[in-house]
Amino acid sequence: MDWSEAELSLTLINDRAMARLNRDTFGRCGPTNVIAFPLDAAPGPDEPGPAPARPDGARGTAPAGTRPGPPPVLGEVVISVETTRRQAWEFGWPWQELLDFFLIHGILHLVGYDHEDPAAATRMEARTWELLGLLYPGRSWEVEPPAPEP
């Protein structure tokens, strides 16, 4: 993904905290499984600006290694462990694998992927499965996980 030297924050919370965050951020009731907060800091005068869209469909700031200074901070991924455990049980997945699935989804948002239209959603879903396959080589999933909630 060309972000080998980037940083991100991962926060694991319970459903009560996630419901509050979901309400305060999006005005939605109840917990969700994952929320990503990209860090869209404006580049400094000597730093390159946002990178153009890449062939894989991602957008965002320039990848690590193309700017001087410390690694860029991509943003924060927040996951509800309670929702992840509940959904894993409902869908027959090991909860740790579903946690990885949601983490990958959040990271993809941080590097510019989205699912706002069908084509973008298809690219994001394909990339998610590709990356999950790298974490669990040879593993096949018979049951699709729950979709990360909007």
Image (tube, rainbow, N blue to C red):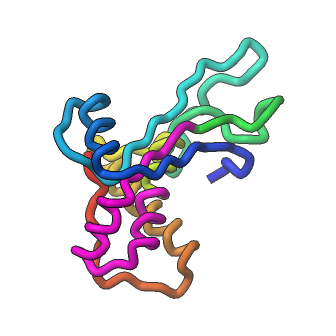
Q: Is residue 44 visible?
A: yes
Give the farthest residue toward the top.
45
Q: Is residue 40 magenta?
A: no
| Residue lying at 56% horizontally and 82% vertically, measured from the top left | 137
Q: Position of residue 150 (x, y in %)?
A: 26, 45
Say which of 102 and 108 sits in front.
102
* 89 in the magenta segment: yes
Image coordinates of residue 101 in percent, x first then y, are 43, 64
Relative to residue 43, is residue 133 drawn left or right? left
Q: Residue at x 37, y 82 (%)?
A: 141
Residue 128: x, y in percent? Answer: 44, 62
Residue, x 44% and y 72% (percent of image)?
Answer: 97
Figure check: 89 above or below 53: below
The answer to whether residue 89 is above or below residue 82 is below
Q: Is residue 77 shown left or right of residue 17?
A: right
User: What residue span does the magenta drawing correspond to?
Assistant: 75-103
- Where residue 119 sits: x, y (%)? 31, 50
Residue visible at 54% across and 35% down? Answer: 60
Q: Is residue 102 left or right of residue 43?
A: left
Would you say residue 118 is visible in this rendering? no
Among the 4 quarters of the image, the one containing residue 26: top left
Q: Residue furthest left?
A: 29
